[in-house]
Amino acid sequence: MFIQRFEEITILTNGIKLILLNDSIEKFVKISEIKKGILNLSILHTSASLIIQENADPDVQKDLINFYDKLVPMNNSLYIHSTEGKDDMPAHIKSSLTNTNLTFSVKDHKVQLGTWQGIFLFEHRLERQKRKVFLHIIGEK
Amino acid sequence: MFIQRFEEITILTNGIKLILLNDSIEKFVKISEIKKGILNLSILHTSASLIIQENADPDVQKDLINFYDKLVPMNNSLYIHSTEGKDDMPAHIKSSLTNTNLTFSVKDHKVQLGTWQGIFLFEHRLERQKRKVFLHIIGEK
Amino acid sequence: MFIQRFEEITILTNGIKLILLNDSIEKFVKISEIKKGILNLSILHTSASLIIQENADPDVQKDLINFYDKLVPMNNSLYIHSTEGKDDMPAHIKSSLTNTNLTFSVKDHKVQLGTWQGIFLFEHRLERQKRKVFLHIIGEK
């Protein structure tokens, strides 16, 4: 029998950083009791995003942050939209280059991920933020 | 009881621009009568894409267009594929940097979006185009 | 009646290249016997990705590869994470700029794609690799 479960989780952030979500996601899948199905994640913001990345060497996360910072500089003279701070427009652009939604397969109660894959919230703002991620699973017990 | 509904919508575009799709999408979800489910959007082109962005300040859209235009210049000397116009290869690249498919959660008959999130068609070609977006919802009434 | 089918396919790669997956995907959809539903693809790696691109002119693929190579240079001095080779960190970044998951609609036993849309595995590493893509369909016969 097909069923659906929802949950909205809140993540407190403090500056530009990648925050691993795997534990929260696995817990949600476990509680849902769904054995096989589709898992959808949506971040409800346009200045933070979702990203799948290597979960082994933390330097990968530093390099990612550096790359996006160089590609989308925090320099107000480059943007028309500058009233919300030098990090706001770059945050929107970085979000558009990464993901707002991600969809995974669940099989045998497990999210199908490669050995090194971590699911991260990618915070693009400098100040503390309260971020909401919507988790949704549809499938069979 | 789980059901599915489909619709293909056509959007006429006229140059590089972001076109808000929220109204068409909400109408589709309402007509489907599905209370909770998964909504999938697919744009059936490789020179226009889908993007989620801030829906408040229109300057954000201008800055996004500027950023992508600078990152992927319309300059035929940069590309091998140049017979379809200076905007064609940049359009393919910009599409690859943004999204062709987006998947959302629907709860209480509403697409789960943050307060400021707009779902946009991002047109990357200079000439008038007829764009098709495929809407699909699977869920329960 | 709603059902689900899974399959994990393995693709052998040999250097930076786009590899068309349409045939494997269509075969999977056909065997599933699902007439309408949602198809989810996940690549189980962080140094190769999924991309939807024009399937007509092969020069488009060359230009895409060139663009991403210029945007994310294979130059170890640019990255902290450099022990796995000059192509490894760029591979992670290119993956983050494209897709790890893609979700499509299936209608009348067919993946809803535009005329020119090809679904590709985008290999970002220089050496031979064995890549796994997880296919998952949920829908009705």
Image: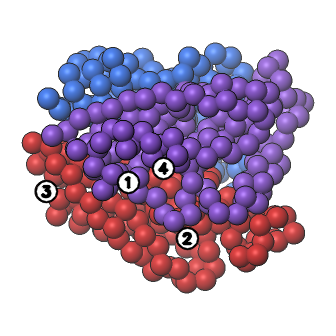
Chain colours: A blue, B red, C purple
Q: Amino acid at mark 1?
A: Lys
Residue in front for this viewpoint, C110 or B126: C110
Looking at the rendered structure, which numbered label has been put on residue C110?
Answer: 1
Q: Amino acid at mark 4?
A: Thr
Residue under the point 33% across and 17% down: A108
Q: Position of residue A85 (x, y in %)?
A: 60, 51
Residue under the point 44% across and 42% down: C27
Residue in front for this viewpoint, A15 or C112: C112
Q: Position of residue A26 (x, y in %)?
A: 37, 19
Q: Which residue is mark 4?
A: A46
Chain bearing mark 1: C
Task: Tell me: residue C129, above or below residue B56.
Answer: above
Residue in front for this viewpoint, A11 or C56: C56
Can I make out residue C21 in this image? yes
Chain bearing mark 2: B
Task: Tell me: residue A71, above or below residue A135.
Answer: below
Q: CA distance from mark 1 to mark 3?
A: 25 Å
Residue under the point 33% across and 67% down: B8
First in sequence: mark 2 vs mark 3 = 3
Q: Amino acid at mark 2?
A: Glu
Q: Position of residue C134 (x, y in %)?
A: 47, 30
Task: Tell me: residue A25, above or below residue B72.
Answer: above
Task: Tell me: residue C116, above or below residue C88.
Answer: below
Q: Residues within 10 Å of mark 3 (few under 14, many from 20)?
A: some
Q: Amino acid at mark 3?
A: Glu
